Image: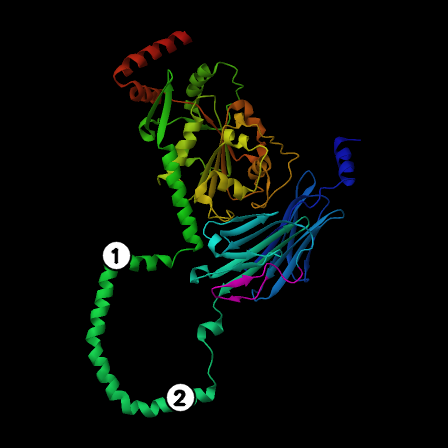
Amino acid sequence: MSEVQIRRTFLSKCHCPVSFLHLELKGDVLVCSSEGIYPQPAVTWTPDSAHQTQTRPMGDQLYSVSSSLALELRPPQRFTCNISTTHSWKSATYSLNPPVEMSSDVTLPCSSSSAPSAPVKSLSWTFNRVQSVLSRSGADVTYGAPWRPFVERLSESGALSLKELSPEQEGEYLCEVHTQQQNYISSTQLGRTKEAAEGPGAPAAVIGVSVCVVLVLAGVVVFFLWKRRQNKKAQNGAAEEQQTSLEERGDPAVLENLLQDNVGAPEEIIRRSSEEMKSTLTQKFKFLTENIRGTTEKMEFDEGFIELCITVGDSGQNHQEHEVLHMETQSRRAADETTVPCQDMFKPRPHSPQPIRLVLTKGVAGVGKTVLTQKLSLDWAEGRAHQDLQLLFPFTFRDLNVLRDTQFSLVELLHHFFSPSKDLCSFQQLQVLFIFDGLDECRLPLDFGRTRVLSDPTESASVHVLLVNLIRGSLLPSALLWITTRPAAANQIPAECVSMVTEVRGFADPQKEQYFRKRFRDQATVVISHIKSASAASTS
């Protein structure tokens, strides 16, 4: 039998089960999706409704599936999506609950009467789909930073009791429950109902009598009302002028009341997290350090940084020569190749309409890969480049190695390393860049063939599972990634995951002289002359 026939025979006798199901409301369309399945899956909705389903082959005879259901957002509603094969199935239920009237103490339901009977793996509550209220995994409950004082109780069924609420807490509350086979999503709107806003209605007859009485009395009192209004006009004008003066002077009490109107808005949370992240990265990367003969010297980053030569594509060399000699020869080759500035790394290349999602940058030890990642991070933090990004997360593989045996969700991992992100519980709709520096130092088992597919940022897994699925694009498919490595370790990343390969070639000749003049200053001319003489001797 041929290899193809053997493969088909093997697949016909085994299966790749439905390992996850992702359910998301986009506007008024409910989208149910999964991938990495064999044999071809089927999708059903309960209640049976008109839907659009697309099933596509992924390669290796695996399938991905996506089904969309248009909704009329009139609660109460409940829809269940089921994805199944002959051997496996998973389902997810979306419940749109009736709105709950705003009061100081409320209890919000987590699901409809048919609550999950299987053991619950995880449960979470979010506010306006962005801010984490709390999450429960087993017996452990973690609270979002501003929400602990408002949570009175979380029941076994997941119902959330809140206390001492104010108008800032009006909005959508989303409960998500995950079991082994099923997911439950429950949406409840908390706010003033129409009846509460209008107040209790009076009977029509009473209103009619009241109007008649007012009309009769109006003719009698109109003169006195007019006179009274004239008397108070001057007093009111003086009070208004004083209030305007307080606001214009920036009276603290007035300004505090004005600012409180925006607290808790999702856009405000994202903006605040972005600003805090920029401040953190500026403090972290604003200095360059250089170790010379056991002495560490520190200088302003912009003062010490020299632009490095980055070329597009792979030189294809095995790099067997000494790395210092390799840096010299590479800088000469770069003259005839396409270069890309650091700030243009993720811009589409000419004659290629495909967006760039993952950039793999290679370079020998000490050529400046880490400094480049610091440069890009600092440019974003100080507003010089990449301002379309809302958040930037720079990791090193050394830091990730320490967590090799620890379970995190992607959201928890980001909260662990980057405290400014702790008010965010979802990064799905944000423009995010992940930097992973030093792939050659990675001690995580990056097995792209055997690692399970994971698409839920709130699901816990080993760090290598999160990393593999970020690189695949299963987790946060809209996120950008930049990975740096020595050439020998570059083949750990599958070619189909990489949008563009670049190579750091070190300094071109003008940049070398610029570096030595900054570094040695008064002795720069002697050093440069010596290096040129040594270079000429080595090539003769």
Q: From what the image shows, is residue 8 above or below residue 506?
A: below
Q: Nearer the viewer, residue 358 or 147?
A: 147
Q: Does the magenta segment cover residue 383?
A: no
Q: From what the image shows, is residue 320 above or below residue 246?
A: above
How far apart are the two marked residues, 1 and 2, measured between alpha carbons? 45 Å
Magenta span: helix, strand or loop, mainly? Answer: loop
Q: Secondary structure at mark 2?
A: helix
Residue at 47% x, 78% y is 200
Q: Which labelled disc corresponds to residue 250?
A: 1
Where is residue 115? Give x, y as percent: 66, 58
Q: Secondary structure at mark 1?
A: loop
Q: Which amino acid does the dot numbered 2 rest on? A: Ser
Q: Nearer the viewer, residue 35 or 437?
A: 437
Which region is colored magenta? 96-114
Marks 1 and 2 close (CB-CB < 8 Å):
no
Q: Nearer the viewer, residue 396 or 536?
A: 396
Q: Quadrant of residue 389?
A: top left
Apparent side of residue 60 relative to residue 408 in the rendered image (left or right): right
First along the sequence among labels 1 and 2: 2
Apparent side of residue 104 relative to residue 93 in the rendered image (left or right): left
Q: Which residue is mark 2?
A: 210
Where is residue 150? Give x, y as percent: 48, 57
